[in-house]
Structures are given as C-alpha cells and as structure tokens.
Amino acid sequence: MPITETTLEELSINTIRFLSADAVQNANSGHPGMPMGAAAMAYTLWTRFLKCNPKNPNWFDRDRFVLSAGHGSMLLYSLLHLTGYDLPLEEIKRFRQWGSKTPGHPERGLTPGVEVSTGPLGQGFGNGVGMAIAEAWLAARYNRPGHNIIDHYTYAICSDGDLMEGISHEAASLAGHLRLGKLIYLYDQNHVTLAGGTPLIFDEDVAGRFAAYGWHTRTITDGNDTAAIAEAIEQAQAETRRPSLILVHTHLGYGAPHKQDTFSAHGSPLGEEELKGAKKALGWPTMDKFYLPQEAVDNFRQAIPKGAKAEQEWQAKWAAYRQEFPAEAAELELAISGKLPDNWAADLPHWKPSDKAIATRAAGGAVMNALAKRIPNLIGGSADLNPSTDTALKGMGDFQPPELGGPTVQGAVGGGWSYAGRNMAFGVREHAMGAAVNGMAAHGGVIPFSATFLVFSDYMRPAIRLGAISGLKANYVFTHDSIAVGEDGPTHEPVEHLASLRAIPGLTVLRPADPTETAEAWAFAIEHNGPCVFALTRQAVPHLDRSKAREPGVAKGAYILSEADGGAPDVILIGTGSEVSLCVEAQEKLKSSGVKARVVSMPSWEIFESQTEAYRESVLPKAIRKRVTVEAGAPTDWRKWAGDEGAIIAVNRFGASAPGEQVLQHLGFTAGHVVSEALRVLGRESEAKGE
C-alpha cells in the first residue's frame, strides 16, 4: 500500500520513539518515557520550523535548540542522527557508554548539534534566555534596513521538572520583562516525574504564571496533534514582543501497554517485553532493535538539502551586507570567529606604587570600561549591584526593550535603552544570571560577563560548573571577596567560597592583589577560551611596588613579587588578593630580625599549576620548606603550597559584623601575625611570641 503523508508522519514519529527506546534498552540505562511522549512535538519543530544545516552545525544564523529536559537526551540524539548530523547509528547503539558521543545527558562540544550541556533541570531553560538575549543584541547592533543578517529563533523543550526548579522562575521573569519575542519553548506537560505523578507536588496554573511573567501561552490538549502544535508555533513566531510557552499535554512512555503515564517509564528502561508491547500497540513492523524505515529516514534527511539552501540564501545576504556595510561586517565577522580586535588592550589603565589605594572592584570597573571601548561585543551586567560591583559600562546603553523607556542602569550614563545596549540588568536573579550568561557564551558572537558578591556565588555555582564542563568563554565577576566586607556580617562575608570555586575542574579563579594585577587578570580572561571567576575587594588596597618583581605576573598564575635581599630566602610568604600587601609589609619587618623573605603573589592556582615544573620550581623551590600562606578564606588545600613545615593563615570560622579592618585584625590578618608565623616556622618561637 502506498504511504501517505499522514502515515509517513506517523511512521517518522514512531521512528523517533523506538530508536530512543531501543537505545535506552540496549544500554539498560536511561529515560525512555520522555522521548516517546514528546516525539510528535519534536518532529513538528524539527521538520517544519527549525532552521539548521546538519552538514554545518555551526552555521551562525541557525536557530538554537535546547533540550532543557536533558534526561530525555535520546530524543535529541535520535533527531540529530535522523536529520543527518554527524552522529552515526553506531554512536546511538553506544548510548551512555565510555567514550561515546551519546552521553547520558547532552554535552556541548562532544556531540555535533548539541548547543549546551543540560541535565540539572532548569539550567537549559536559563541558557535559552541567554541565547535569545545574544540574538537580540547582535541583531540590534548589526542588522540594517533590508539586511537582517542576524535573524533566528531560540527553541527549547522543557519539562515539569524544569518548571519546578527555582531557576526557571527567575529566567522566565527576566525573559518576560525583556520581551524576547524570538524565544519559543515547548513544555512537555506529561504530569509525571521520577518519583510519581505531578499531583503529588505540582498542581499550579503554569499557563497563568507565565502569562503573569509577560509570556504568550498556548495549550495543546493532544500531544500527538501535529497540526495544532504547528499552528501554535506559527502563532508564537507571530508574537514578536513576548516570549512563548506552548503547553503540550503528552503521555510519558506513549504506547507502552502497562507503563504509559507512570513514573516507571521515566528513569528506567521499559524492559524487553514492555518495549515489544509498545511496538505492537503502535503497529511497528518488527521487534528488531534499531530498525529505521527507509521512508522515515528519507523524510528526515530532507533537512540536509533544506538546511544547505537556507545557509546558501544567508550567504548571499551576507555577501550583500559585506558590500554595503564593510565596517560592520568586518566587526561582526571578528566577533563570530571569537578573535579579538587589533590593539584591544591599548587603553588598559596603568598605576604607580605612589597612587592612591583603591579597591580591586574599582580597578576592575576601570579595566572593563577600557576594554569595552576596544572590544565592541563585551557585554553583561550585574544582579542589581552595579553601584557595588563597579561593572557598569559607562555610556554604552542599557539592554532593554526600547518601548519601555526609563532611566539607565546606575553608573551606565548615556547610550539609552535599546537591544543594542551593552549593560544587562539581570535583577536580583543570580541563578538565572549565571545560566543566561552561559547561554550568551554558547550562542557565540559576544563575550559576556555577570557580576554579584562572592558570597552569592552559592546561587550561581550550578551554572558556573556547567560553564566549566562546557568550556564556555564566560566571565563571572564577584566582588566583596572576604571577611573585609565588614559590617554586613557573616551572611555576606565569604569564607569557603574560594575553595569551593577552585574545586571546579576547568574553571580559572583569579584573585588579584592590586589594580595592576586586576588589569592583568582581565587581559588573561579576555584571551582565555574558558570560564573565569574574578574575586575582587570591596576595600581599598595599595598599589604594590614591582621593582623587585620577576615577570610576568598574573599570566603565570604565581610569581615572585618581591625577592629577598642578600641571597636565597629563608622563608617564602605566599598571598592572594588583598593579603599580598600584608606579606610585603611582613617582608620588611622580618629584615629587622635578620630574616630574608621572598613574597610570592598567587592570583590563580589553576594558571600556576598549568606551568612547567621548571617555572613552578623557580617560584616555589622544593628546597625552601619554610613557607607561610595568607588568604582571608578557608584553609582548604592550602597545605599543598605551605608544605608540611609551613604555616597557613586562613579563616576557620564565619566572619563577624564590625568594620572590615577590625574583623581582619581580630581574625589574624595583620602584618604582625604574618611575621610571627614566619618566625615560628623558622624555629624562632620566642621571637615570634615577642612579635
């Protein structure tokens, strides 16, 4: 019997279902229910709407697709394989196995076509908001009348679990305020979670909530009604001033005779008999694993010529744009490539030791503004803290819907409100801010930053971790970096946070000692292809004298800031951030006791650890075992730098509410205490007590 359009569609949708379920069963691990239930809406989106080129997954003007419900990863892998991405069937058969391109949750950089690493629920939701921000900003800056060179949507499939996580509430609120009309989410509303049905814990009016956030919503009562789903997507595309949430009522594990609509189909394979029962129920022609009907494959593979045509049409637009707007095209091309403009560091500020002491947060603001003048795609913002973090890009406008009007972000004088503004007002939404900045970085074309207090890195840590897993070029700026915060007290004084962030693989933590190191830290981050954390002071710090320093400073992670006079040092004083100046003071005081001390500034453990053994030995010789480390944070892991015979000056308790200088003194962060500890490790105990 000849296949009809209707039967071809049904066959194709079932191909997604059973390729996904077969892979999960073959691995004896995974989540089959979500791909089986969401197959129809995914099919509709990918075959009728998604603008992409499977043979060039990185084509810049492609639509972005995020599977926020990352536990249903086989849905995405099935779509990628079937539409012709470089994901062979053999990789599908190796789902969740060592070294495969089909890990349990999608990972950016591993699987062609995967835009972001998702798994922790809600993070992908926030990533999508960041992608839509990046698209809107690039379009506003570079598009010209008759030349929409940046013009694409951000789509996502999210789940009940995504919408329960707090981060999605923050991100949805932000997206609604920003009126991101090219953000379209499909909500797989199957009413089942890993542990049971949603009536146990989640019975709110989701559509009403999103409408209150300023989203356009549509509800589809039959998750297999592709015509209704298509109509809803078309309406979402027509809604240009509101993001859209399409609530699609689906059946988890659709077709499974005993496990459909139960949590048993959520996080475990169906089992051989149940899988066979599903195939029989849906009229699948064979019980063989990984059977792909040729008619369905041919249907999906139309994405290849369709995508090639779409990219060719865009290339023609690009050629016309380059001819008419050569300067803008050159700037955009550089941004897309990830390369930096010539002389990008030419305006970096310089300071002298005699200059007035300033906080490294203030120095950071000066550096960022100097960089922003030369790097047009450096954009970002704070969690309602610009006056405190000093991260406003002055005169560069605010990223806001232009129709709202109103005052600029405090400190971002001039530039007005538009989608071309470079200052993002994230609001008091650190969770969403972290995920959105990751999404901006994953989108490409921009170098994004976020800013808040270091103590609130707790709110952002899941996003920072995913940024590190993905190797995203995202910069997370944290100020108020120690107990020197003072009067705000223990709730706002970070203690364990530096140690927690340093524990994240692939993340570079930068804690500069003075304004010069702050400039060097930013120079490193701008060139570095990975995420960086800045830990900057609230309090003023002196400009350090580098007359006895050995180059090159922050670029090596740790360096000799001040060498001992008169030969090999007796003791090495190692500090980070504001505590380096204490080491310098202590070095001078120790001279009166006849002690030769070397001062090492260590702004980044990670960078230092990546250096050659020869360089590390030149800074911290193994033969010099007498060392004192000084950091106003938890002592975690400092023993590897202090050594067995060294002393660690750190914070072993929460802080206190008092002026910052008093808190530091009471907890032992004085030059005198550093001197005492140096004398103690040298065996000069009596002198140490006298000090």
Image (cartoon, rainbow, N blue to C red):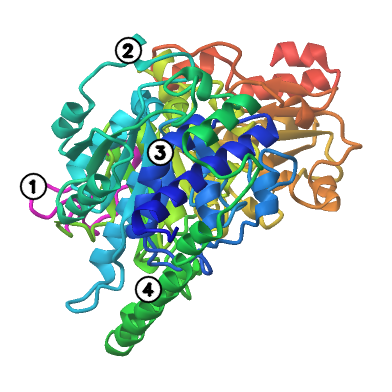
Q: Amino acid at mark 2?
A: Pro
The residue sitting at 17% across, 46% down in the picture is 242
Q: Amino acid at mark 3?
A: Ala
Q: What residue sits right under mark 1 in the picture?
A: 406
Q: Secondary structure at mark 4?
A: helix
Rendered image: mark on residue 188: none
Q: What residue sits right under mark 3 in the picture?
A: 38
The answer to whether marks 4 and 2 mark residues whose Cβ atoms lie closer than 8 Å is no
Between disc 2 and disc 3, the foreground one is 3
Near mark 3 (Cα within 10 A), the count class, few <14, some 14-19 or many ≥20, is many
Spot occupied by residue 215 in the image (x, y as percentages of width and height): 18, 39
Distance in Å between CA atoms under marks 2 and 1: 43 Å
Q: What residue sits right under mark 4 in the picture?
A: 310
The answer to whether marks 1 and 3 mark residues whose Cβ atoms lie closer than 8 Å is no
The residue sitting at 45% across, 58% down in the picture is 1
Q: What residue sits right under mark 2 in the picture?
A: 199
Specify the segment rendered in magenta. 387-414
Between disc 2 and disc 1, the foreground one is 2
Spot occupied by residue 607 in the image (x, y as percentages of width and height): 67, 47
Work out whether 326 lies above or below 661.
Answer: below
Distance in Å between CA atoms under marks 4 and 3: 26 Å
Near mark 4 (Cα within 10 A), the count class, few <14, some 14-19 or many ≥20, is some
Distance in Å between CA atoms under marks 1 and 3: 42 Å
